[in-house]
Image: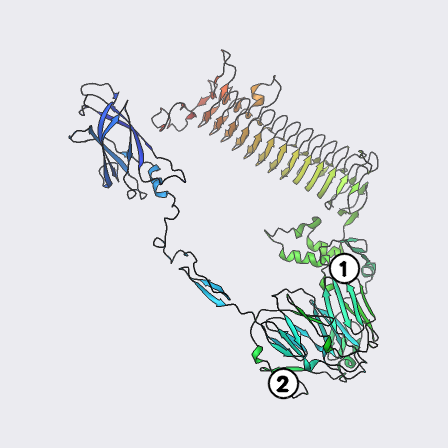
Amino acid sequence: MKLNLTGTILLLTTLLLASHNIGAAPLGTAFTYQGELKVIPGGNDIVIPANAAFDFEFELYDAQNNGLQVGPTVLLNNIQVAQGVFTVELDFGMSPFVGDQLYLAISLRDGNSNGSFSDLSPRQKLTAAPYALHAEYVAAGTVGSVEVNPTQVQLRVLGTCPAGSFITSVNQNGTVVCEDDADEQSLSLVGSQLSISNGNSIDLANVSGDNDDSNELNTGLTLNGTTLTVTDAGGDLNQDLASIDTDDQTLSLNGNQLSISDGNTVDLGTVSGDNDDSNELNTGLALNGTTLTVTDAGGDLSQDLASIDTDDQTLSFDGSQLSISEGNSADLSALINDDDNELQTLSFDGSQLSISDGNSANLSSLINNDSNELQDLNLSNDQLGLSGSLSTVDLSGYLDNTDAQTLSLVDNDLSISGGNAVSLAALFNDNDATNELNTGLDFTNTTLTVTDAGGDLTVDLSGLSDTGAQILAKLITVDGAGSGLDADLLDGLEASDIIAAAGGGDNRTPISSIPFTITEPGSYYLTGNLSNTTLNSDGIIIDTDNVTLDLGGFTISGYDTNDPPNQTGDDGIYILGSQNNIHIFNGHVEGWAGDGINALNADHSIFERLTVSYNGGDGLVADFSAVISHVTAGFNGLDGIEGDDGTVIVFSTAMGNGDNGIQTSEGSHVAHSTGFDNESDGIDVGAGSTVTNSVASDNLIFGIDLALGGTVQMSTAYDNERTGIDVASASIVRNNVVALNGGSSDPNLEPYNISGIRTFANSWIINNKAHENDGAGIWISSTDTLVEGNSITDNDNGGLVVTTSGSLILNNKAAGNFYPDGPDGTTYDDNFELNANSNWGPIVDLTGVGGDISSVPNSDHPFANFVY
């Protein structure tokens, strides 16, 4: 039967966009359009679904009414409409979808006819889905150089460099710039200093000629940075003690010609030869691992320097005794008790060596002895010459640039880092081993002593090893936000305090055994782990105000040293009487028959960075106005952490305790803390208190128990045996999550005792999430409560249950909640169970409603509650 288009035509439409699976064929630009077409035949008021074939015409416009057409017209003929439903595929191409709002205009006529089209009104507003076509990923291989602007995008690097050269830069178009790889170096000899270009130098004075046999005793031994210098009348021997790695090179010696691979050659003939056997300058100074070796014709003397390792050390100071971990100790009593000791200053003027507040010594005899005949090598331009000689050699041909290298001399072997060694024994023409031999080498503390016939020479090597104070001083210079260091809080002191302590300025009192009683204000610290063996006694008793107790990372234990352990004490730390301003930090208190820390009589005190565990009573008990930070209280017989009025507890954890995890009195604040797996409540706070950003889970009673006039916000109560958050009157419960609470096996518990949130009169319950609790999601037990903006889903004994009058219920959402024991013995949906004398916004049931809800009655009401 042909459709009479003179009647009214109604069109309800839904836009669907086909999904795109990565790896499948390209999506294209077409999208699916599905609509529902109903008609009112002429002269009839009954609306029926269309069942016929129609020709459709689709166009895009830039306005709801009038406006301009955008893109092509899509004509689809003879489209079958069955039971009012039709589906078509529309393809306007990509060009219309550039981000502007578009409207779909639809016209139709009888199928396969030649009549005019009738416009349907209104035009359909396109949602964002078709615009997803514009965000389709770029397929592999579809972007080439034509599509890429090389001024904005770096093209693929295709250029290469020939062998013997390397890439120095890459051009925007992918070509490269190359440069030859030169690896040649130049040796030069100036005086007795043999140098390598871009590298170091080494003193060859010990191989130079010396015909005067009346001198050559060692006259000096110094350490400058990592360079050790031994001096005699012939000059200096230098040895760099720092390990310097570089490229491989090869040295070779042919006669007097010393050569380096890829480099030049230098003639050593002018520095060889020593025909006088009555003197013996030191001929070698070498460091191999931690072994220092001094060599002359008589052989080697070696000293192990391992004891000056710069590994981290720990300084401790007890009375006048300064000790270093893994090292020795020194009695500083003479420095501490002697008022006459002063810092001294060395000065050198000409040949006069002086010490402040002391005498001076004339060193001119060491400086002005010119009886030895030293020779000098000099290099002028490219000519290498020897003083007193007319012969020169032209080195200009060997002055090629190469990488930095390091020379070292061990015994008779001259080596280059990363390369070979060559023996210089042929240059040392002294066969008499009976004179000037080194006779001793000793290393005590940080002092190195070399002995020969002339006596002893000493040098202080402490510059190679930092003291504890120096290490701390360095930490101070680099400590800062984000550095990962904690130099200002080592052992509870600032680093400067520890440095002062290392120098004898520590005024703290050590505690090396317990029981111990503190009767004077001041600072105290533990020297190690302490275990109590005295029956019925406290570990440390504080009987005064203004005490700082640093546990130093150690443990105060209530066990004796037997195996298995036995409890032998009362409280680990006990505050006797009424005290103020007690600060206890940085350590562990465990295994006491009583409390770990009993500070019930200590007002305005601080407890931080502590572990209190396995004590028979409470873990930590604090008096009013205490600050408790970074404390872990685990497996204590009673409460984990207990605070009086005005206590602040932050970043702390209480788990596995026999009563409450965290418990406080009035006006307290608990933040960023956790109560887990405790025998009673996870977090239990007094009237007027707040709990923020905290977690309570797996506790046997309530997760969070809040007294009158309190606030719980931004917190989580999860999987507790009874109610997640249980709140007294006049409280605020806002932005919390309560889930899976009420798992108790007690069949006699009422639903309100196993709910997500329960509260009493005059409270605000705002923007919480209550999910899968065994009782109700939210249970209101008294009057005048505001319940607003909560999401309540899948709870087992109702969603929102309001049992009394006078409450206001606005903008809540509930789904999947049910009541398991209905009048007929079956379950039934129970999302909102409200007392008739309360007030609420309209409850809009969206179950079974799909798509746009704007036509659902009251869906746009400002106070509407929704079931979905």
Q: Is residue 664 visible?
A: no
Question: Which circle marks residue 307 in the picture?
Answer: 1
Image spot of residue 443 (x, y percent): 80, 64
Image spot of residue 284 (x, y percent): 74, 72
On the rendered structure, is 718 left or right of 574? left
The relative height of residue 442 versus residue 659 in the rendered view (above or below) is: below
Single out the residue that lies furthest toward the left. Answer: 115
- Under circle 1, the secondary element is helix
Q: Tell me the kind of residue under disc 1.
A: Ser
Residue at figure coordinates x 57%, y 36% from the top left: 692
Image spot of residue 368 (x, y percent): 76, 83
Image spot of residue 263 (x, y percent): 59, 74
Q: Quadrant of residue 264?
A: bottom right
Question: Which circle marks residue 392 in the picture?
Answer: 2
State which quarter of the image contains the N terminus: top left
On the rendered structure, is 435 left or right of 596? right
Which is nearer the eye, 57 or 280?
280
Residue at figure coordinates x 60%, y 69% from the top left: 404
Q: Nearer the viewer, mark 2 or mark 1?
A: 2
Residue at figure coordinates x 35%, y 35% from the top left: 18
Residue at figure coordinates x 70%, y 48% from the top left: 492
Q: Tell me the kind of residue under disc 2.
A: Thr
The relative height of residue 1 versus residue 354 in the rendered view (above or below) is: above
State which quarter of the image contains the C terminus: top left
Q: CA distance from mark 2 to mark 1?
A: 48 Å
- Under circle 2, the secondary element is strand
Q: Quadrant of residue 102?
A: top left
